[in-house]
Amino acid sequence: MALNDDSFIREVNEELRSDQIKSVWRRFGRILIAVAVLIVVGTAVHRAYDYWQTQKASGSGDQFLSALKLIDEKKPDEALKALETLAAEGHGSYPLLASMRSATLLEEKGDAAGAVAAFSAIGKDAQAPTALRDVARLRAAWILIESGSYEQVSAEVEQMATPQNALRHSAREALGLSAYKAGDIKRAKDWFQQIIDDTETPRNVASRAQIMLDLIAASGKAA
């Protein structure tokens, strides 16, 4: 008798579950189908967009290689034009790479002002990775050592001359050399001393800083 009771209870439970499922399906079936369709369509659109982006980036990569080939062929003006077009219209990471190479090409052509402006613009681009922005600022600063003022160099890299920045050593060196060139010996000495005092300074940078400190001491201008 107990077995029959258990069987009856199971059948009732199954019927109840079946009725509940039917009830839920009648109420929400269309919504569930719509959600499923949206998921399928959304996935298809996402994959199609990824494919489109990949194809576009691949085309930009070909353009970048073509511009580099023009540089190798000693056609800087044509290369510069190609790089500027890619920087404005390219896809993926290639516009940024094109901007960096374009700035370098301007420097190689002797256009210091154009190169500084290009590197400085990259340094201010909030969309660019921080590390690349810092490298661009540093490149601008080193050009400005020869062609600009201490204030211009400082505007580019003094914010990088902090203990937390990986490029602080080169930033301090640029600031020290710029100050020395401007005749601000005390400030130059301070920057070179910071390089020496930093235990993480690369040996070659520290050696150059020590040479400058010795030069300042020998000149009798040390403050």
Image (cartoon, grey):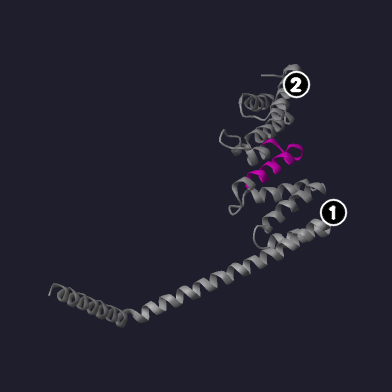
Q: Position of residue 8 (x, y in %)?
A: 18, 77
- Which callout, 1 or 2, points to the residue nearer the camera? 1
Judged from the image, the secondary structure of the residue bearing numbered disc 2 is: helix
Q: In which quarter of the image is residue 204?
A: top right
Residue at 46% across / 73% down in the picture?
Answer: 39
38 on left or right of 202? left
Judged from the image, the secondary structure of the residue bearing numbered disc 1 is: helix
- CA gap, disc 1 and disc 2: 40 Å
Task: Identify the amino acid type marked 1.
Answer: Asp
Q: Where is residue 85 in the image (x, y as percent from the top left)?
A: 73, 62
The verdict on residue 136 being magenta is yes
Which disc, if any, is residue 215? 2
> Crowding near pointer 1: few (<14 within 10 Å), some, many (20+)?
few
Relative to residue 144, is residue 67 depicted above or below? Answer: below
Q: Position of residue 117 (x, y in %)?
A: 71, 49
Looking at the rendering, in which quadrant would you find the N terminus? bottom left
Residue 81 visible at all:
no
Task: Identify the amino acid type marked 2.
Answer: Leu
Residue segment shown in magenta = 133-150
Which disc, if any, is residue 146? none
95 on left or right of 40? right
Residue annotated with mark 1: 72
Q: Earlier in the sequence, mark 1 or mark 2?
A: 1
Residue at 74% across / 50% down in the picture?
Answer: 103
The total of numbered circles placed on residues is 2
Residue at 72% across / 46% down in the picture?
Answer: 116
